Image (tube, rainbow, N blue to C red):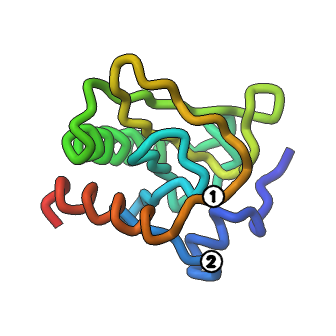
Amino acid sequence: MSYDTNNIFAKILRGEIPCHKVYEDEHTLAFMDVMPQADGHTLVIPKMPSRNLLDADPRALGALMAAVQKVANAAKQAFGAEGVLIQQFNESAAGQTVFHLHVHILPRHGGVALRPHTGKMADHAMLAEQAARIRAALGG
C-alpha cells in the first residue's frame, strides 16, 4: 500500500488542520491525541512521509524515537505518572487507523484503566491545557 498524502496527519503537517502542539523540531511533530485514552495522551509523528514503521526511511526513525523519548519524559513529569505506555501500530490488522507513522505516548498510573477509544473528540480546552503542561515540562 502507498502513502496517502491526504491523511489527517499529513494535513496537520501542512497546517490545513489545527492541532494542540506539544513539541516540534526539524524532523518531528508532537501533538495531543484528540481522542485520548489517558490524560496527556500525545502523538509523535515524523515530518517525512511514511505509512508506518514498515516503510519508513530508517533515517527518520532515529529522530522520531529521540522525540518520543523527550516527549514521554515530559508527559510523565507533567502528569505525575508512574510510567509511560508507548504504542505504535502497523496496518489495519494491527490496529492502525491513520496511515502516517505515529507513536502514542500515554502517561500511566497504577490501577487506572485506559479509557476506551470511543471515536468521540475530547474537549479542546482540556487538550490545550494538557498540551501546555507538557510544553512546560519540556521547558518551553
38 to 120, vertically: above or below:
above
Query: Does label 2 or label 1 sit earlier along the sequence?
Result: 2
Q: Secondary structure at mark 1?
A: loop
Amino acid type indicated by mark 2: Ile
Q: Are marks 2 and 1 in contact (CB under 8 Å)?
A: no
Residue 45 visible: yes
Residue furthest to the left: 139
Q: Secondary structure at mark 2?
A: loop
Marks 2 and 1, Cα distance to the nearest angstrom?
17 Å
Q: Quadrant of the C terminus?
A: bottom left
Residue 25 visible: no
- Residue at 21%, 37% in the rendered image: 80
Percent across and percent down for residue 63 are: 38, 47
- Residue at 43%, 25% in the rendered image: 112
Closer to the camera in the image, 4 or 55: 4
* Number of marks in picture: 2
The residue carrying mark 1 is 49
Say left or right for 70 vs 27: left
Residue furthest to the bottom: 16
Percent across and percent down for residue 102 are: 57, 46
Q: Quadrant of the N terminus?
A: top right
Closer to the camera in the image, 44 or 26: 44
Amino acid type indicated by mark 1: Pro
Report the mark closest to the observer, 2 or 1.
2
Answer few, some or many: residues within 10 Å of disc 1's Cα (few below 14, many 20 plus, some between 14 and 19): many
The residue carrying mark 2 is 17
